[in-house]
Image: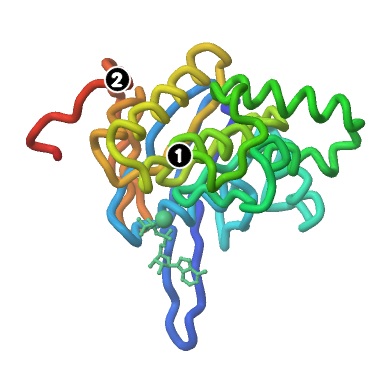
């Protein structure tokens, strides 16, 4: 059984008199430890799909099994619990709290974990170490570069040791060199720690850093292809794709 099994997922939003079919029947398996990219034009349903995979939202129809659990049958409180335990989110705009340090930002998701202060701090420091920010733990977001802020956001996403890391346009707000550093970090989390990573991007060059590329169009999967030779992070972008 795959970590994620989606079967004929649909998501319909009611907008006044109109229905928006954001997902029109998506079936997809994602294995534990995979790193893949979801691509597609604006409005094709990428973020909607990530909200459902990330247990932020439920499908209108179809089924979703996560780690053997049937997600669409869960109550809201159970859904929140699965989300907190199994999912880490990273967004384009880092969504950090500006008035607190990197360490406090990473500590936040541990608030409900029942861990003591010392154990929480150790976990948060370990997550910051994984993203290479050991020397910046007391800095506030405004005192960090964009790439460093995204690293704090990734450490925050990792601190609960989630089964799945979901990153929606994680390099969208970064220059191409910093974007490459962040892609290198995702690649290392995947190769060294077996982290499952689902990356959403509209950028084909970013997508080619992964071994599998799934394309969405109008709420449907139009292709699902293997990329046997992923781009190594740090590779300059070819001129034509600038
Ligand atoms: N909460 C909502 N209410 C109504 N319609 C929505 C809602 N969320 C998304 N949609 C619609 O569903 C479709 C898919 O949106 P989605 O955000 O998933 O696209 P996307 O592929 O992530 O696009 P982008 O690349 O611009 O981020 C769009 O037509 C959008 O307008
Ligand atoms: Mg989106």
Residue 200 placement, left or right of 224? right
10 Å crowding of disc 2: few (<14), some (14-19), many (20+):
some
- Circle number at residue 155: none
Q: Are marks 1 and 2 in contact (CB under 8 Å)?
A: no
Q: Residue at x 56, y 17 (%)?
A: 194
Q: Residue at x 36, y 26 (%)?
A: 210
Residue 131 placement, left or right of 223? right
Give the secondary structure at mark 1.
loop
Give the secondary structure at mark 2.
loop
Q: CA distance from mark 1 to mark 2?
A: 27 Å
Classify 195 as above or below 220.
Answer: above
Numbered label tally: 2
Percent of width and height locating residue 26: 44, 49
Percent of width and height locating residue 104: 73, 40
Q: Quick one: which residue is furthest to the left in this view?
A: 240
Percent of width and height locating residue 63: 59, 48
Which residue position holds label 2?
A: 230
Q: Residue at x 76, y 25 (%)?
A: 123
Which residue position holds label 1?
A: 145
Q: Quadrant of ligand 2?
A: bottom left
Q: Residue at x 89, y 32 (%)?
A: 117
């Amino acid at each position: 059984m795959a970590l994620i099994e989606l079967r004929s997922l649909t998501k319909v939003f009611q907008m006044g008199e109109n229905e928006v079919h954001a997902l029109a029947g998506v079936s997809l398996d994602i294995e534990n430890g995979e790193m893949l990219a979801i691509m597609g034009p604006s409005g094709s349903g990428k973020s909607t799909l990530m909200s459902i995979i990330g247990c932020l939202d439920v499908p209108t129809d179809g089924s979703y099994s996560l780690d053997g659990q049937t997600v669409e049958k869960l109550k809201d409180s159970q859904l929140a619990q699965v989300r907190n335990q199994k999912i880490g989110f990273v967004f384009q705009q880092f969504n950090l709290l500006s008035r607190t340090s990197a360490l406090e930002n990473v500590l936040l998701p541990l608030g409900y974990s029942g861990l003591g202060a010392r154990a929480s701090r150790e976990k948060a420091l370990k997550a910051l170490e994984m993203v290479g920010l050991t020397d910046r733990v007391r800095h506030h977001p405004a005192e960090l570069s964009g790439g460093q802020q995204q690293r704090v956001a990734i450490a925050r996403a990792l601190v609960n040791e989630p089964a799945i890391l979901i990153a929606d346009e994680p390099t969208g707000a970064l220059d191409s060199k910093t974007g490459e550093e962040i892609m290198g970090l995702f690649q290392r989390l995947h190769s060294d720690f077996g982290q499952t990573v689902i990356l959403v991007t509209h950028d084909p060059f970013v997508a080619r850093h992964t071994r599998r590329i799934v394309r969405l169009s109008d709420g449907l999967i139009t292709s699902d292809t293997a990329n046997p030779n992923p781009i190594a992070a740090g590779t300059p972008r070819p001129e034509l794709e600038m």
